[in-house]
């Protein structure tokens, strides 16, 4: 999937992946896609809730080699 920006939250524990994802999205234009990489298993549920609460679309959530990869489209 194509994306405009990437943020690697590997090694960060809740709530830091969400806090830093929010900061990464802040300087992006509506419609742009952010790819987030996380090693925190809790980020799977957190990212879905974050997207729903903030109006950003969670386009995909996958696990790749023990890491969780999310694609968020800025609303």
Image: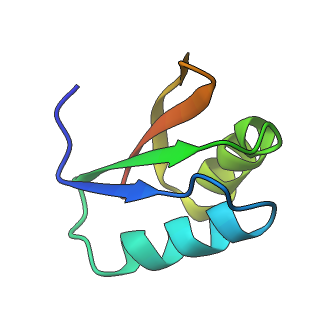
Residue 45: x, y in percent?
A: 79, 38
**In the rendered image, the vertical position of residue 2 relative to residue 50, given as above or below:** above
Q: Quadrant of residue 42?
A: top right
Q: Is residue 19 left or right of residue 32?
A: right
Front residue of 21/49: it is 21
Residue shown at the point (58%, 52%) measured from the top left: 10
Residue 9: x, y in percent?
A: 55, 57
In the rendered picture of this protein, how many numbered marks are placed on residues?
0
Q: Quadrant of the C terminus?
A: bottom left
Front residue of 63/71: it is 63
**In the rendered image, the vertical position of residue 73 relative to residue 69, given as above or below:** below
Residue shown at the point (16%, 33%) measured from the top left: 2
Q: Is residue 74 left or right of residue 58?
A: left
Q: Is residue 28 left or right of residue 59?
A: left
Residue 60: x, y in percent?
A: 46, 26
Residue shown at the point (59%, 31%) measured from the top left: 67
Residue 29: x, y in percent?
A: 20, 69
Q: Quadrant of the N terminus?
A: top left
**In the rendered image, the vertical position of residue 18 relative to residue 24, given as above or below:** above
Please, which colouring scheme is shown?
rainbow
Q: Is residue 23 left or right of residue 35?
A: right
**In the rendered image, the vertical position of residue 64 relative to residue 40, given as above or below:** above
């Amino acid at each position: 999937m194509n994306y405009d920006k990437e943020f690697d939250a590997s090694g960060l524990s809740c709530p830091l992946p969400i806090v830093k994802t929010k900061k990464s999205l802040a300087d992006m234009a509506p419609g742009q896609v952010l790819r987030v990489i996380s090693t925190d298993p809790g980020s799977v549920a957190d990212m879905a809730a974050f997207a729903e609460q903030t109006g950003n679309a969670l386009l995909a959530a996958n696990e790749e080699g023990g890491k969780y990869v999310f694609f968020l489209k800025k609303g």
